[in-house]
Each structure stands twice: as structure tokens, then as C-alpha cells.
Amino acid sequence: MNNSFENRERPDEATVFALREIVRRHGTPAYAFDVRRLVAQVEKLRSYLPPEVELLYSLKANASLGICDVLADCGIGADVASAGEFATALEAGFPANRIFVAGPFKLPETIARLHNTPEAIVSIDSPSELQRLSDVHAPNSAVLRLRPDFGSCAVVPAGSESRFGFTCDDLQRCRDFLPSCNVDVIGFHVFAGSQVLDADKLNEHLRRALDLSLRAAETLAIEPTYINLGGGFGIPYAADGEELDLARVGDELASLVARAAPARIVLELGRYFVAEAGWYLTSVVGHQTFQGRPAVIVDGGVHQRADMCGLHLRKKQCPPLVLNADSSTLTPTDVLGCLSLPDDVMLEASPLPKLSSGDILAFGNAGAYGMWSSPAIFHGSPLPAEAAFDGAEIHLMRERKPAQSILEDQLHVVTKTAPAPA
Ligand SMILES: Cc1ncc(COP(=O)(O)O)c(C=O)c1O
């Protein structure tokens, strides 16, 4: 096996064996998730962050039931943003009182679930939503999402320019309504953006989110007991990327916990839990040239990797692991997806060995915002298989569907008569 993971930790033999086995059993394209890595991420966070900090898994990063099963078993809570994610969190076994229901607008199905799950905490995004949840007598304790009054340093920013949450003016206007409304507001929620790798910048987000929450508490004259400071913990996608310095983040959080008391501090993290546990497995199906370089075409594409576009990964991510190439000479090579879309370029000038049709490219760090955030049915594509591996044990999470499956659940507009038998 040739491994072009030059500067990063090479995956161990058990991982390589599991990836090969998943391809053998379920074909490509497929996603593979390393259960041990998911558990290790939770343990790593717990070892660096103060025990008082409560952790939630943000299902928007990847709402696969199997992944939620594993993370629920680790004893963390869930941050959900739709009725579908809410149903998944309950099915996976996250305790109802550790489910945090957010999102800019709660559709009727979500409101119905809130009524059926009174222990869940709801994050209210705007004054109109506060009015609505009061009108429908939602029984849940609530926090108000606050729009950051500071700029975001995140790669995917959600600072003062974002459109989510109450502004300071909104809070002033709600002040008189709050005591008479049917919503029990117990605290605040701030999210300043995703993928922050620099501990100082992340600490600044967390500190300013707490400052903002404490000011909001003064404005509304309430004593908060629950403050969700967001998170946005980043992971290194680039081959030479530095890891987030969790020790420094832990030190900062220790002082924020003390400042927030008696309110408890909560963090909602998606990417940090799942990104590094995920692999996207594709097969080489053809050859081309691209801008004078050799290029290979694979049977996947960016329609199943939304993270590649949002983070501009094609130029900077680690080369994929090549599971079965036989040459060790590396040549800058492009990897193209199989969509007729100019943007379907998965990698540019990546150092890869000479590749033949049938070779398997395993893209690491693919567990967050991949298929679960993608225009996955573009070109009438069926969904890829998803499997988890726990050492050598493999669990199928979703069967790869045949092309014909794209017609399931669709209805004709024009009645078709069956062709007469020949
Ligand atoms: C409100 C909110 N919370 C949590 C997250 C999860 O962020 P991350 O995956 O960076 O941890 C996001 C991501 O965009 C978000 O918008």
C-alpha cells in the first residue's frame, strides 16, 4: 500500500484494513466512520475542559443515526436544529433534558415535539419567535440567542454581521414583555462561527459571548442559569495544519465558568467531534489532464462533500490515502469528481502515486458537513453507503442505493402507458 499522508499521522493498519473491508463489502462511493476516533474526541475534550462545562453534539455537522448512537453513549447532549434532528437525537438515546433545540424558526413539527419533550431546552432566535412560543405555550425552558456584537474570526463566520439572534435593541424592546409572557427564559445562547483553529481567537469568542450574555441578563433583569457559548472548535484540514491548543481553551473556560456561576456553561460542537473520524471512499474510474497536470476522475464528487466547497479544501487538504496503488513516485495530480460541473474538482496538484482505474482514494477528515450538508441528489445521484468501524468490526449504517432508487417516492405528472409487448 502506498500512503501519501506525508506530514500527518499515518492511519494505523487496523484503520486501513477496515477501510478496505468497507469498500469490499459496500463499494464506492461510501463514507466510513471510525467509532474509536469519535469516542477519543469526546475523551480528549473532557480531559482538557473543566468538568463543569457541558458538551452538546451539534447534529448539523452529521446527523447519521449511527454516529449519534455513539456520541449519545459517550454521555454528551445534543444540539438540534430541525424536527428531523430532534427525532434522531431522541432515537439515538440522548437524554431529553440534554437536548437543545435551536434554529431560526421552529416549524410546527418541531413545536409539536417540544410539547412532547418538555425537558428539552429551546433556543429562541428572535422577538417574533418569543411571541410565537409564548402563544403556543411551549412548556420548555428557554434561552435567547444573542447576535454577537463583535466580529468573528471563524473561517465560517457568524459575528455581528450574522442574521441570527436578538440584537441589543431587540432585548430592550422585549424587556417589558418577558415577565408576562408564557416562556421561562433561563439564559442565553451565542454562536460566533465555525472552524476556529487559533486558541487565542477562540478564547476571545468565548469571552465576548459570556460578556454579551451577562450584559443581556442585566438588560432583562434576570439571573441566568444556562449559558451556551457556542464553540466553533476547528480541526486542521491542511497537511501542515496545527491542532487547536485545547489546554489554552481549557484555561480560559475555567475562568469563564467561575465568572458565569451559578449559571452553567454549555458548548455546542459539531465539527470537532466528527470531522476527523470520517473517511470518504472513492474509486478511480478514469483519467484526464487538467491544466497540464495528470488528473484522475473518481466515482464521487463535491455533491457528497459540501465541506470541500465551504472551506475551499481542494487546494489545501491532505492528499487522500491511496489504498492499493503500487508506485511510490509522487506526481502532482488533480482529482476530479464525476459531475458535469466545472467546480467538481476535489483536489488540485496533490502529490499522488500513478493511479489506475479501480484504485481507491480515501479522503480523511471528511466526517463533518460532508454528505449531510450536500446537494446530494444532484445529477440524480443515489446516496452513498455509510458504514462505521470499531477496530475490525464493521457496521453498515446505510446501504448504497442503486441508480434506480432515485425514482422511489416520485409520482408521474403525465400518465404513461406501458409499451406494448414486442
Ligand atoms: C448555531 C450553530 N451551532 C453550532 C454549530 C456547529 O459548529 P461546529 O461544527 O463548528 O462545531 C453551528 C455550525 O454552523 C451553528 O450554526
Image (spheres, rainbow, N blue to C red):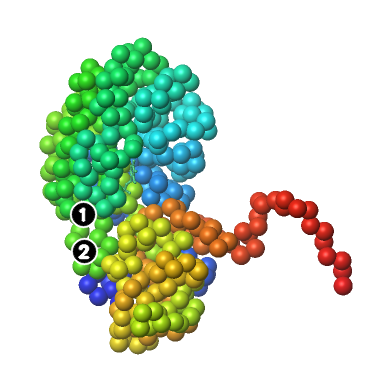
Residue 100 in view (yes/no): yes
Compared with 224, 105 (above or below) is below
Q: Nearer the viewer, residue 21 or 186?
A: 186
Residue 257, percent from left and from top? 17, 34
> Furthest residue to the top?
180
Q: Which residue is more in the foreground, 207 or 391?
A: 207
Q: How many discs mark residues in the rendered view? A: 2
Expressed as whole percent of the image width and height from the top left, the position of residue 75 reads 34, 42
Task: Kindly identify the residue that appears in the image at 19 percent across and 27 percent down.
Answer: 214
Q: Please tell me how crowded label 1 is: few (under 14), some (14-19), or many (20+) other residues with Cα within 10 Å.
A: many
Residue at 31% x, 29% y is 166
Q: Nearer the viewer, residue 117 or 206?
A: 206
Cα separation between marks 2 and 1: 9 Å
Task: Look at label 1 and name its amino acid.
Answer: Leu
Task: Tell me where residue 104 sits by quadrant.
Answer: top left
The quarter of the picture showing ligand 1: top left
Nearest the eye: 55 or 75 = 55
Identify which amino acid the numbered label 2 is placed on: Gly
Q: Is residue 152 left or right of residue 101?
A: left
Q: Please identify the quarter of the rendering in which residue 350 is found.
A: bottom left
Which of marks 1 and 2 precedes in the sequence? 1
| Contact check, label 2 and label 1, Cβ < 8 Å | yes
Horizontal and vertical percent for residue 1? 36, 81
Q: Element under label 2?
A: loop
Dot 1: element: loop
Q: In the displayed structure, does residue 230 sit left or right of residue 128? A: left
Residue 313 falls in which quadrant of the image?
bottom left
**Residue occupying the point 33% across, 38% down:** 163
Report which residue position mark 1 lands on. 197
Q: Which mark is residue 241?
A: 2
Residue at 54% across, 58% down: 377
